[in-house]
Image (cartoon, helix red, strand yellow):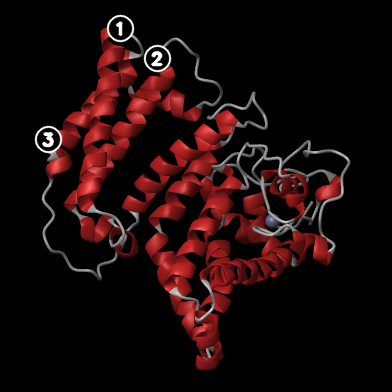
């Protein structure tokens, strides 16, 4: 069974329909998340994110875990009964049995300290579940490349980035908070902050996205134009297939630098908490969505808002697209600074870095900036 599972996770392409493979994969993935979820209930101080667990209801999480167990088990049972991919379903059963044996959705949670070092397992589980549901659905509904399967080539590398970048959320939060305060604390002025805080919500929201995107634009441009920084950023650009998961491919150092610089003006200007929360939802959505295998036709609004139609060009290795379309939210920023792609085609032909020099696999990409000799 493990042999077959290994082969499946190392492969890519369409899951052959009619054999229960797709449902088997869904069942096993859910079972794995359930098992991890039960572990998070047992060790919340080490496996959950303080900022996140404050904002969700534990009873809702128990319901979610319960229904995931039911759905995963139900699918596995159906597949076993009808002789479809029994080995996959068996795997689901082992994990569900383990999860139930460890207390399932009924694990009691007692008081626990708030300041232990932790990994963001809850953030990983919830974001993977939510993002898969939303983005796979949207990608199937409005596909750009219909023939591209969910498990397209190199999905493993991007998923590995997704896993690590979620698990280290605590470290990233800590590092960026520290850096923002140490480097930019001096710039905070009470008068400015009072003015920003009295702005109507929608005005403040537009301002925060604009300020964040202007900083993001110049940071991003520096990543492309300064060779030392490109070493880090090339990792993000090495994805040769675009979908919602491709945006996860990012070097951890780039993640921390960019986030620190983008959060700096937000912190200095002193935006209200609800404005920052709304901005986090927008940036979280667009960071994923702009990479998705989706076509969005906005008409003239395409000069204003960044969509996959705009950002896919940024990831192209076609000549007219090199060092263009930097914006993450507002497309007009690129039009303003003269870096918008001008092409007579709607979509690029090839993604990735010119020369395809990036090694595959998470660890090699993590080391890449330090081992790379020079651009070929
Ligand atoms: Zn870039």
Which residue is the site of mark 3?
A: 101
Q: Earlier in the sequence, mark 2 or mark 1?
A: 2
- Labels 3 & 2 near each other (Cβ < 8 A): no
Q: Is residue 27 above or below residue 313?
A: above
| Residue 366, percent from left and from top | 54, 54
Which residue is tagged 1?
Answer: 82
User: Residue 158 placed where, x, y %?
Assistant: 53, 43
One can see residue 101 in this view: yes
Q: Residues within 10 Å of mark 2 (few under 14, many from 20)?
A: many
**As rendered, which of 83 and 214 lies closer to the eye?**
214
Please tell me in which quadrant of the rendered image residue 144 appears.
Answer: top right
CA gap, disc 3 and disc 2: 27 Å
Q: Position of residue 195 (x, y in %)?
A: 54, 86
- Mark 3 is surrounded, within 10 Å at the Cα level, by few (under 14), some (14 to 19) or many (20 or more) other residues, namely few
User: Relative to 171, does residue 73 appear above or below in the rendering?
Assistant: above
| Upstream in sequence: badge 3 or badge 1 | 1
Q: Earlier in the sequence, mark 3 or mark 2?
A: 2
Q: Going 68% across and 69% down the picture, which residue do you hit?
A: 214
Q: Which mark's residue is nearer the viewer, 3 or 2?
A: 2
Q: Is mark 2 within 8 Å of ligand 1?
A: no
3 vs 1, front mark:
1
Disc 2 and disc 1: Cα gap in Å? 9 Å
Residue at horizontal 49%, vertical 80%? 197
For the point 52% across and 60% down, which residue is it? 252
Answer with the quarter of the image where residue 125 lies. top left
Query: Is residue 372 at least partly visible in the picture?
Result: no
Q: Which residue is mark 2?
A: 20
In terms of secondary structure, where does tag 3 sit? helix
Task: State if disc 1 and disc 2 touch (CB < 8 Å).
Answer: yes
Q: Secondary structure at mark 1?
A: loop
């Amino acid at each position: 069974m493990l042999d077959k599972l290994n082969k499946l996770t190392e492969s890519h392409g369409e899951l052959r329909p009619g054999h229960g493979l797709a449902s088997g994969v869904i069942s096993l993935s859910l079972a794995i998340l359930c098992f991890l979820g039960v572990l998070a209930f047992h060790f919340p101080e080490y496996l959950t994110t303080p900022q996140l667990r404050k904002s969700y209801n534990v009873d809702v999480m128990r319901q979610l875990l319960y229904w995931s167990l039911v759905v995963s088990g139900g699918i596995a049972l159906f597949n076993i009964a009808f002789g479809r991919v029994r080995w996959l379903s068996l795997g689901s059963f082992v994990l569900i049995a383990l999860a139930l044996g460890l207390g399932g959705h009924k694990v009691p949670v007692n008081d626990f300290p708030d300041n232990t070092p932790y990994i963001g397992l809850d953030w990983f589980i919830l974001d993977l579940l939510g993002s898969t549901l939303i983005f796979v659905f949207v990608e199937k509904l409005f596909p750009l490349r219909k023939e591209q399967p969910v498990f397209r080539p190199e999905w493993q590398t991007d998923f590995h980035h997704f896993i690590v970048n979620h698990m280290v959320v605590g470290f990233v939060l800590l590092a960026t908070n520290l850096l923002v305060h140490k480097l930019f604390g001096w710039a905070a002025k009470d008068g400015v902050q009072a003015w920003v805080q009295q702005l109507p919500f929608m005005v403040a929201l537009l301002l925060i996205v604009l300020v964040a995107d202007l900083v993001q634009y110049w940071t991003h441009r520096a990543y492309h134009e300064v060779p030392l920084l490109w070493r880090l950023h090339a990792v993000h650009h090495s994805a040769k297939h675009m979908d919602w998961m491709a945006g996860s491919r990012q070097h951890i150092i780039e993640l921390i630098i960019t986030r620190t610089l983008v959060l700096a003006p937000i912190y200095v200007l002193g935006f209200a908490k609800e404005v920052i929360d709304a901005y986090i939802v927008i940036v979280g959505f667009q960071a994923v969505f702009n990479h998705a295998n989706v076509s969005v036709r906005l008409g003239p609004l395409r000069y204003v808002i960044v969509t996959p139609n705009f950002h896919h060009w940024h990831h192209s290795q076609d000549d007219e697209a090199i060092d263009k379309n930097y914006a993450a939210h507002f497309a007009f920023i690129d039009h303003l600074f003269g870096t918008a792609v001008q092409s007579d085609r709607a979509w690029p032909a090839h993604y990735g870095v010119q020369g395809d020099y990036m090694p595959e696999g998470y660890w090699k990409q993590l080391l890449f900036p330090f081992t790379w000799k020079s651009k070929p």
